[in-house]
Amino acid sequence: GAVVSQHPSWVICKSGTSVKIECRSLDFQATTMFWYRQFPKQSLMLMATSNEGSKATYEQGVEKDKFLINHASLTLSTLTVTSAHPEDSSFYICSATRSDRGSQPQHFGDGTRLSIL
Amino acid sequence: SQKIEQNSEALNIQEGKTATLTCNYTNYSPAYLQWYRQDPGRGPVFLLLIRENEKEKRKERLKVTFDTTLKQSLFHITASQPADSATYLCALDNQGGKLIFGQGTELSVKP
């Protein structure tokens, strides 16, 4: 089956630090990758949609200068949380899909637990 | 805007019974509806996809129904096992392959 690797799995750092999270599709070329944020006992909230070679599309209310997304290849997308603060602490999850149509399932990484002190 | 509601209460059932989870949506009928399983601290895992012109889809012990009149999908796990304990998420396609997720229903299967 499709495998998506997300790294690191957890990060603890000081306020003001920038943190980079990587999302790789290991066995297929991902046309589109998505970045989500999830709070405890809540659903996944889409932050942005990332297509290879083009700028990410951010959801309403998500600061693009705060959450930098780069999708340099069909197998790698990165999310950088710039100057992170305690309110940015959350569970960040990426997913990859073979197309931008809803008929395709999304394949998720195992998430990154980010804790800002 | 589209809203999705899943059973907010955790579902506790006995091993061997059938678990039935509900997903209701409020607005337009999506072309596709998907179900995912999520274990604590892990990413969701895709289970089943059903199209708007399909009434029912099965995969091993799993069955999904899709009623566009009621704006509802039901997710069934037959002969449930403790290993089926997890949170189950339904998701509807929006546009550009985007999914809108429900808040999930936590299922606990007791031996």
Image (cartoon, grey):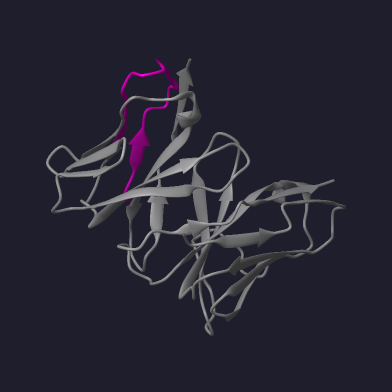
Q: Is residue A98 above or below residue A1?
A: below
The magenta stretch is B1-23
* Residue A61 image point, x, y percent: 54, 58
Question: In the depicted view, which residue is nearer to us: B89 or B110?
Answer: B110
* Residue B51 image point, x, y percent: 21, 54
Seen from this angle, which residue lies furthest bottom?
A53
Q: Is residue B104 left or right of residue B66?
A: right
Q: How many marks?
A: 0
Which quadrant of the structure image shows residue B39?
A: top right
Q: Is residue A54 above or below residue A77?
A: below
Question: In the depicted view, which residue is nearer to us: B70 or A106?
Answer: A106
Please tell me which residue is depicted at 36% across the width and 19% down the height of the picture: B16
Which quadrant of the structure image shows residue B61?
A: top left
| Residue B3 drawn in magenta | yes
Q: Is residue A23 left or right of residue A29?
A: right
Q: Is residue A45 above or below residue B6?
A: below
| Residue B20 drawn in magenta | yes
